[in-house]
Image: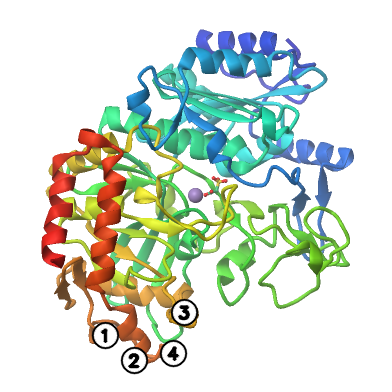
Amino acid sequence: MATAPHLLTPLPKLSREVADWVESVRQLTQPDAVHWCEGSEEEIRQLTEQLVQSGELMKLNQEQFPGCHLYRSHPSDVARVEHLTYVCTRSKDDAGPNNNWMDPAEAHAKMDGLFRGCMRGRTLYVVPYCMGPLDSPYARCGIEITDSAYVVINMALMTRMGRAALERIAREGTFVRGLHSIGELDPERRFIMHFPEELTIKSYGSGYGGNALLGKKCHALRIASWQARDEGWLAEHMLLVELKSPRGETHYVAAAFPSACGKTNLAMLIPPASMPGWEVSTIGDDIAWIHPGPDGRLWAINPEAGYFGVVPGTNPETNRNAYEMIRRDTLFTNVALTEDGQPWWEGLSTGKPVIDWQGRPYDPANGPAAHPNSRFTVSARRNPRYSPRAEDPRGVPLSAIIFGGRRRSVAPLVYEARDWNHGVLVGASVASETTAAAVGQVGVVRRDPMAMQPFCGYNFADYWRHWIAMGSRLTNPPRIFHVNWFRRDAQGNFLWPGFGENLRVIAWMLERCTGKAGAVESPIGYLPRVEDLDTQGLNVSGDALRELLTVDPALWRKEASDMRAYLAQFGNRVPKELVAELEKMEQRLA
Ligand code: SAT
Ligand code: MN
């Protein structure tokens, strides 16, 4: 087997299983060469250079953006493809109505047909990675085999990739197998298949993040959620943020929002000038693995080591930390270019686009200059507010869990669940307007329980049962809240400024956790009164604040009946505790 020439020291003794699997994939896919990734800086530098030579990557203006590159994906390959994403379990009911399902034998046959000979003329990269700190008992490893060097470079930024992960795999003897090929990039020959019972992923025909960086949504959410159910923990689509109050208390909060609803901005929040003394640091921006601790609290790690964030809208006013973070050593995908080779995107007030995301001369008639789902990939270590606790093998203890959606109406700015089981209903009821992160119509409201609709690797009914069971094991559970930063007035204007000002809402939550803040009871849970929020220096009218904190019982009765209809598709598999919570809410609304 050919190995890369720059591997100077021998790789750790491979476990038989790894060696056999790689060899069987090599025989199936017929690559010209096999490259075992060791994860060194020199290796990534060489791969990057190679892609610049071949024209797949473009060096950006190195004076303004040192170490930054641009990648343009195929225009038909710019987002996740949920209609082509499958969970292949032996029993169809285990995948549930929330997933596309295919029989595992049929799916393997279909995928192996696509993979047969698909790497001829290409290099097969073996990418060992660890999700979570290498020394954490909560971390889990995988190996992705891919024929895309772009994927390798992304995986090096997004995970603990290379030799140390392979060593852990050899020690533990277990890993998630991911097989990926960009294939012909033909949307008709594109599938993302998950086999949770075999801890296996097969992805063909796309080079886009969520479809191709198999450590992320495929492993850390779809496969991990299944493992978590079996092992008694939670794998969630949540950011993790550290907040130090002016009183010197430190809290950790997890928050679930659908894709492209501002998770990265909340994870990197910059306190407004009128809230001195607050310090906010990032643990993670997309995924949390959460375990019950011996102290009866929930403890969370971020399985990732980098950010794959939405670029448009990032600027010094909305997120100064992110704006600074992506000025070095960042891989941009599908942004526009200025005359002097700097990246450009909608939401920047400086510079002008001359080349659009497809490499054409910029013409507003063709739509936005940067793709609305254009992304940055960057190591978390580049974040000026990266918390050292993100590397703690024990994780961080959670004070609160926040659920949120993008809703023009109905959901108030914030409310608090009455207890854990009510919080599970609140999470299960998340609904949001769709965004550009997935292929399909943008802006239609769909149910997205726990922001996991595209990512839960098993039947949602079983997942809610697992959530309820987790709560019964906690003597000190986090409080559960729901927020909506996106509520609008009758003219369609946003009522709430968002971004740094969201800290006012979180500050109220933390005061609730420590028993200091006031609230009023409503049929849907506890809401702050205007005077319970810190509004000093906030530029929002009293009328707007009152509207933001209004619960309209008629709208909520409609919401409850929508929820009832939504749950009905899961039949009597829905846990009775969840139905009971919905009934109690209906009674309070009657
Ligand atoms: O492409 S990803 O799935 O990683 C981004 C997202 O949709 O959250
Ligand atoms: Mn996400």
The residue carrying mark 4 is 539
Quarter residue 109 falls in: top right
Task: Indicate the position of residue 114 as horizontal and vertical percent values.
Answer: 67, 19
Q: Would you say the residues marked 1 and 4 are in contact, meaning their CB atoms lie under 8 Å apart?
A: no
Q: Is residue 500 left or right of residue 546?
A: right
Q: Secondary structure at mark 1?
A: helix
The residue carrying mark 1 is 530
Amino acid type indicated by mark 2: Gly
Task: Indicate the position of residue 23 as horizontal and vertical percent values.
Answer: 63, 9
Q: Disc 2, ligand 2: is the CB inside 8 Å? A: no
Q: Is residue 36 left or right of residue 259?
A: right
Q: Disc 4, ligand 2: is the CB inside 8 Å? A: no
Q: CA distance from mark 3 to mark 1?
A: 16 Å
Q: Would you say the residues marked 3 and 1 are in contact, meaning their CB atoms lie under 8 Å apart?
A: no
Q: Secondary structure at mark 3?
A: loop
* Quadrant of the drawing holding the N terminus: top right
Give the residue drawn at x 27%, y 44%: 567
Amino acid type indicated by mark 3: Pro
Q: Would you say the residues marked 2 and 1 are in contact, meaning their CB atoms lie under 8 Å apart?
A: yes
Amino acid type indicated by mark 1: Val
Quarter residue 301 falls in: top left
Query: Is 17 drawn above or below residue 76 in the view shown?
Result: above
- Mark with earlier residue (1, 4): 1
Residue 497, numbered circle:
3
Query: Is 553 drawn above or below residue 158 in the view shown?
Result: below
